[in-house]
Amino acid sequence: MTGTMQLAFIGLGVMGGPMTGHLARAGHRVTAYNRSSGRAAKWRGAWKEENLPVAFADTPGKAARGADIVFTCVGNDEDLAAITLAEDGVLSSLGEGALLVDHTTTSAAMARELGEACGARGIGFVDAPVSGGQAGAENGTLAVMCGGSQKDMVRARPVMEAYGKAIVHVGPVGAGQTAKMANQMCIAGVLAGLSEAVRLAEAAGLDLDKTYEAISGGAAQSWQMDNRWKTMCAGEFDFGFAIDWMRKDLGYALDEAKRLGLTSPVTALVDQFYADVQAAGGSRYDTSALITRLPKGNSAT
């Protein structure tokens, strides 16, 4: 637990919006900023109905002014640099001793660059990408993988507990992002296998519910199987985390692997499978839409 703090949250997307709400419900004073005024208006209305103490600013710098901790959750390296390092960005307003916690999934290089920029100003920094999707953000059950100093983690952890169920300090700045890359590589590989398994069961004429029941209790079980088997079978692909974002994340992972002298052939292959789904118009489908690139076979009679 922690006392009431002055916080800022930059980026009110499908993840950042719910996370901001959890911080306000925990009793903190929060100032929010979002680049899209339409999305900001949506959250403004929702939080007003809840009587939550969330104020709004019209620039990232104004949102960050006077904050003890600023949280960011935007799209990619370029977006993060724009809201933090620009003339009226977050770092222009934060005082010495403040803390920046970044929940964006970025490259590890971006995390290290931002960490150095914060350090030069006497500002703490934690790179803290999250996993758990839109449902995890809404339910306050996200997994948060963190890179930074122990001192900064001590300050950040109790506040992040408003929306984080599993908060793990992986290592120094950049380690959180690298752990998130490993996370995305695992998800991509599992979904590739799951897609092929569903198509096999369909073509063989199996009862899909019974097949799930039979295999989900053993070594094949996974979060993706438990949460996406039935929706994949039903052709439903609107569950928050878009293929566009997964390809961005896998790109960071492949770049980091190359920097470390590694090859990642499975990740590279699944990334190209996702490119096929994008080319077919599925960019905004969630990642389980990987199955759509596989045609259905001839069902058994």
Image: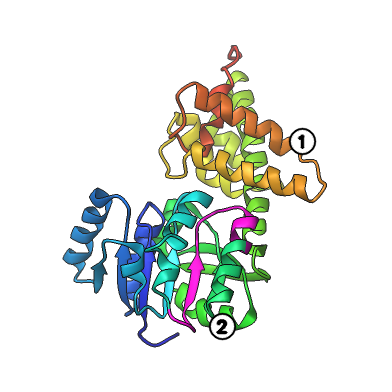
Q: Position of residue 128 (x, y in %)?
A: 55, 65
Q: Is residue 99 magenta?
A: yes
Residue 265's disc is 1
x, y (%) of residue 269?
Answer: 70, 31
Above or below, 207 relative to 219? above
In which quadrant of the rendered view does residue 143 lie?
Answer: bottom right
Taking the view exactly as shown, the residue that stands out farthest to the bottom is 3
Disc ID at residue 138: none
**Which secondary structure, mark 2?**
helix
Res. 242 visible in picture: yes
Quadrant (top left, top right, bottom left, bottom right) of the C terminus: top right
Image quarter for residue 258?
top right
Instruction: Give 207 or 30, whichever is nearer the viewer.
Output: 30
**What residue is at 50 percent from the left and 57 percent from the top?**
104
Going 36% across and 71% down the picture, which residue do you hit? Answer: 64
Mark 1 vs mark 2: which is more N-terminal? 2
284 left or right of 266?
Answer: left
- Mark 1, Cα crowd under 10 Å, few <14 / some 14-19 / many 20+, is few
Distance between the alpha carbons at the discs numbered 1 and 2:
38 Å
Q: Amino acid at mark 1?
A: Pro
Quick one: SS at disc 1? helix
Residue at position x 19%, y 71% from top? 51
- Residue at the front extreme of this rendering: 87
Residue type beneath disc 2: Val
Quarter in which the N terminus is drawn = bottom left
Q: Which residues are magenta?
A: 95-112
Where's residue 234, x and y in %? 45, 30
Q: Is 182 left, or right, of 206 in this rendering?
A: right
User: Which residue is the site of mark 2?
Assistant: 154
Residue 73 locus on image (x, y percent)? 44, 58
Q: Is 24 on the left or on the right of 275, as rendered?
A: left
The answer to which of 76 and 236 lies nearer the viewer is 76
